[in-house]
Amino acid sequence: SSSSLKREMRNLSEECSLEPVTVSMAYVYFEKLVLQGKLNKQNRKLCAGACVLLAAKISSDLRKHEVKHLIDKLEERFRFNRRDLIGFEFTVLVALELALYLPENQVLPHYRRLTQQS
């Protein structure tokens, strides 16, 4: 389900010490893809992974090796191939119409929830 996927996204992000704001952005990307009907059984995990990766790249100044570590973790956790992940990253970008910088009101509700939980 999409809530269990979101939990996976959060756990993985915490393991990689990503900030709650990054996870929040990933959630918004993910929900936009859901709303656009882009998700199916085959690509759900790739979708989730690509959203985390994009949010991480945008919201934190990750070094090259940190991005590589994140991709390793995503591959391991979601059991997909990094080549597919990189391809899917582009799909997500197009679906989001390249609008990666999100208005605060889209990110804040998730951010509040995440920061209250921990």
Image: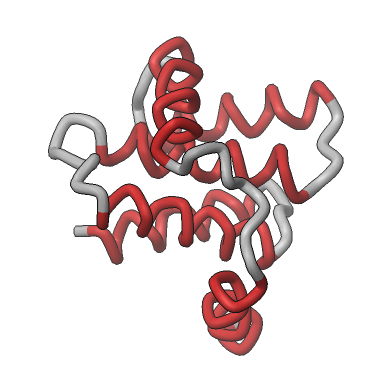
Instruction: In this rendered view, identify the residue nearer to me: 61 or 117.
Output: 61
Which percent across, then down, holds residue 64? 81, 22
**11 w.r.t. 80: above or below:** below
Image quarter for residue 41? Answer: top left
Q: Residue furthest left?
A: 41
Residue 47 location in percent, x, y?
36, 38
Residue for point 68% across, 44% down: 56
**Frontmost residue, 2 versus 74:** 2
Q: Residue furthest bottom?
A: 116
Towards the viewer: 85 or 17: 85
Look at the image and name its color scheme.
secondary structure
The residue furthest top is 83
Q: In the figure, is residue 96 to the left or right of 66?
A: left
Seen in the picture, residue 18 relative to 103 is either above or below; the reply is: above
Q: Position of residue 38 (x, y in %)?
A: 24, 40
Residue 58 picture quarter: top right
State the quadrant of the N terminus. bottom left
Among the 4 quarters of the image, the one containing residue 72: top right
At a point 41% along the width and 54% down the height, the residue shown is: 8
Which quadrant does the C terminus fall into? bottom right
Q: Residue at x 45, y 38 (%)?
A: 49
Q: How many marks?
A: 0
Considering only vertical position in the picture, is 43 above or below 28? Answer: above
Q: Position of residue 42 (x, y in %)?
A: 17, 30
Q: Is residue 101 left or right of residue 3?
A: right
Instruction: Say whether residue 6 is left or right of residue 65.
Output: left
